[in-house]
Image: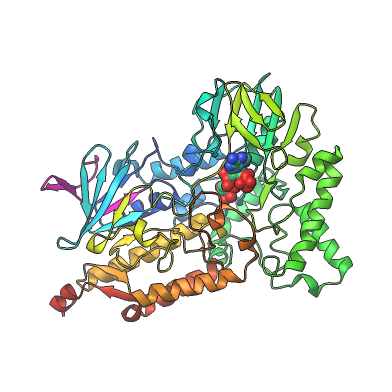
Amino acid sequence: MTQGNRATKSSGACRVDVIVVGAGFAGMYATYKFREMGKNVAAIEAGGDVGGVWYWNRYPGARCDLMSVDYSYGFSPEIEQEWTWSEQFAAQPEILAYANFVADRLDLRRHYRFNTRVTRAAWDEEAKVWRAIIDTGETLEAPYCIMATGPLSVPKDPEIPGIERFEGTLLRAQKWPHEPVDFAGKRVGVIGTGSTGIQIIQTLGRQAGELFVFQRTPSFTLPMRNHVLEPDYIAEMKRHYRAMREAMRNNPTGGTRPATSRPFFSLPPSQRREVMEQAWINGGHTFLGSFADLLSNQEANDQVADFVREKIGQIVEDPKTAEALKPRGYPIFARRPCLDTEYYETYNLPNVHLVDVSKDPIIGITEKGVRTESGDTELDMLIFATGYDALTGALLAFDVVGRGGRTLKDKWKNGPRSYLGFMAEGFPNLFAPSGPNGPAALANLVTIAEHDVDWIAEMVSFMEANGIRTVEPTVSAEEGWMALVLSMAEKSLIRKANTWWVGANVKGKPQGLTMFIGGFQKYRELCAAAAQDKASNFVFDRAAQSAAA
Ligand code: NAP
């Protein structure tokens, strides 16, 4: 099919060795990895090019709040030396440029079909292949299927009546136009104050004629303190990349941010205050690296939340606005912590207006703008920054049919279940790197993606060396993994906030924290241990095994 593939056609299907779905960081790496193993890879991507979430999210102010040196591939020392990051926290254009650089450098595009969607993927037990139907009507078949569909790839509109009536310009953060958008002199509304909305608001407050922020739940956001990377620092970093990658693999965040074992109350009050002040000054996610128990000790969490609320009160001049911006009713860090650049200061600008829709609910969208209980706000442009059907949305957006005709939708009707986050009982040879029961959104997704793909590739190599055609986790391995994931989650304060982390943002979605909260390092150790004890944890294609024996 795709130029560069040695695909063969039989019975109407295009036969390859590995199907990869997605051209985000996991999909690109999987494509490269399996190609380097001599496999014939057919890769599919709904977007027009590589980059995944960074291809789509071109909204003003889009930026990653993980450090650029962390949020990059570690598998290629050459790429590390050839690519130079310009800022501590890279903006979307630079991250997309990096994805493009990697795709060019490794010649990945020849494996991809862009602007193409998989509409169904089904396992053929007899032929031991996955058949993926794509929206051109063609079918791909391969023994292995890698669903690198990403945890944040299915955008979600707000459930507000009348969206189609709006006569102004409607923009969605997660499907932003490729052409520049001019906000000068315009009345702009933003719905959504998560990580995305915050970045848009702090940027457009300084560009739009009038900016109206429709806030239902305020997020806690901390200063990013972004800066340009100095040549000396870059040179040093390039000399020490190997050691840094090793440190990342052994870090709960999968990044270089230092971890701590210090409990909050192990310090006297004045010292705790000093540490918090310093964390505020240092910026980034320093708080989380300053105390170990902020997500397990409610009292410690309350004190940090109070500290941040106090800062909000000091920055925002209008007391009523300040009060509305102070998050209450859920623990800090239980909703994705955001990093900002003068977000709270934005509300001191005369053209920026906060509409607290928790008190004055949105009733609908009209031809002219947003209608709340107290009246209408007329707008030229309306932006949705209302998030995603996250973690499971992309894998459940089409039918994935496993052994015996069982669908993933059925298997996951009460929430996602898998082994190690990326394999599911009943779905042989199907792998979903950065899947919903791994560390997913709680650690560095690039580190997780690389780890998962490496693990999967090793499993495939093992199988081929032993004449095994299929692998899936045993029922008990999967049950054990899920019991571990859920028992760890029970202790976390994350469960106390209504967020996409727990599925609360999508009506009818099963609720619960199903991500592995034990940190990347522990996750990696458990994945390694699982591979050590293959006989207990996996069902292999026994017929092929005995034929090989
Ligand atoms: P999000 O965190 O799910 O936030 C969605 C926002 O939309 C929430 O404030 C939500 O309010 C609001 N909303 C939804 N429906 C609404 C309605 N009907 N009326 C009023 N408000 C409504 O989504 P996101 O901001 O796109 O972020 C998703 C994730 O992407 C982040 O958590 C992060 O992992 C990633 N991300 C990262 C960065 C970064 O690295 N800096 C940037 C952007 C995104 P409620 O909370 O009240 O429902």
Q: Is residue 190 left or right of residue 80?
A: right
Find residue 434 and report its horizontal and vertical position in percent: 45, 58
Q: Quadrant of residue 418?
A: bottom left
The residue nearer to you, when weighing 418 against 256, is 418
Q: Measuring 19% from the left and 47% from the top, which residue is drawn there? A: 6
Find residue 83 and report its horizontal and vertical position in percent: 51, 45
**Count of numbered labels shown in the rendering:** 0
Q: Measuring 48% from the left and 37% from the top, which residue is drawn there? A: 56
Q: Is residue 394 left or right of residue 131?
A: right
Find residue 381 and report its horizontal and vertical position in percent: 60, 24
Find residue 442 and report its horizontal and vertical position in percent: 56, 59
Instruction: Tell me, yes or no, whether the highlighted magenta stretch contains residue 41.
Output: no
Q: Quadrant of ligand 1?
A: top right
Q: Quadrant of the C terminus?
A: bottom left
Q: Is residue 366 above or below residue 546?
A: above
The span shown in magenta is 1-21
Q: Is residue 510 above or below residue 373?
A: below
